[in-house]
Amino acid sequence: MSLSLVKEVHRRLTGVTGPGDLCLDATAGNGFDTLFLARQVGAEGTIHSMDLQSDALLMTGSLLEKHGLAERVTTHLSCHSKMETVLPPDAKGRIRAITFNLGYLPKGNKSITTKAETTLPAIRNSYDWLARNGVLSVLCYLGHPGGKNEEQAVRKLIQDQGWKDEAIPGNESGESPVLHWIEKT
Ligand SMILES: C[S@@+](CC[C@H](N)C(=O)[O-])C[C@H]1O[C@@H](n2cnc3c(N)ncnc32)[C@H](O)[C@@H]1O
């Protein structure tokens, strides 16, 4: 994972999320982004956290338990392209921040990665679930198979939709990851 861009995502989320907010982590993984969001929203807030691997949700659940924050998070074993089947309908248009951290589960099965064909519909749907002025954070990695194509497809989707986006490259040499920071206007 790109630590510098993960930190940048958290730094930016600090400015836009706060007590009582509703947020979605669309790629739970080891749970670090979910934990970060759970701290941000406080006891009155709610986090939904999704992953298609049960191993990821186990890691996320135990991290949250360790920090005593499990009760403000609902986890969903699901592909993020099917978010409308697991999220409560009244969350639509109310989510303050949605995070995607693409690629594979660190220390997990590296052959299971996000893929453009499900990442794209998931990101497109996410925009509809955001509140006005909400943010969509998409951290793309280019190193895994299909990663470059996935990032190009994400970039094209953003352009086609005319979304307000800031593309921030990581500072790694070689195939640097890219963060897309999208604000719903
Ligand atoms: C880079 S990891 C996420 C890291 C995580 N945010 C953290 O803080 O530890 C990417 C995750 O995306 C998950 N994933 C891959 N395809 C997915 C899909 N279609 N829907 C939901 N999760 C998916 C993987 O199982 C993996 O756990």
Image: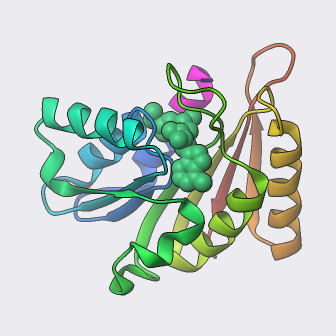
Please check the rendered image and state whether residue 5 is part of the magenta-colored stretch, yes or no.
yes
User: Would you say 121 lies left or right of 88 here?
Assistant: right
Identity of the residue drawn at 53% across and 31% down = 105
Q: Quadrant of the C terminus?
A: bottom right
For this orientation, the residue located farthest to the bottom is 90
User: Would you say 138 lies left or right of 142 here?
Assistant: left
State the residue in front, 111 or 134.
111
> From what the image shows, is residue 23 above or below residue 91?
above
Q: Quadrant of the N terminus?
A: top right
| Image x and y of residue 35, in percent | 31, 39
State the residue in front, 126 or 168.
126
Identity of the residue drawn at 69% across and 57% down = 119
Quadrant in the picture for residue 36: top left
Main SS class of the magenta portion in the image: helix
* Scheme of image coloration: rainbow
> From what the image shows, is residue 130 above or below residue 144?
below
> From what the image shows, is residue 124 above or below residue 58?
below
For this orientation, the residue located farthest to the top is 173
| Image x and y of residue 132, in percent | 52, 78
How many marks overall? 0
| Image x and y of residue 61, in percent | 25, 40
Identity of the residue drawn at 53% across and 24% down = 106
Quadrant in the picture for residue 158: bottom right
Please check the rendered image and state whether residue 81 is part of the magenta-colored stretch, yes or no.
no
Magenta span:
2-7
User: Would you say 157 lies left or right of 20 here?
Assistant: right
Identity of the residue drawn at 43% across and 44% down = 28
| Image x and y of residue 19, in percent | 23, 58
- Is residue 130 something one can see in this rendering? no
- Is residue 35 something one can see in this rendering? yes
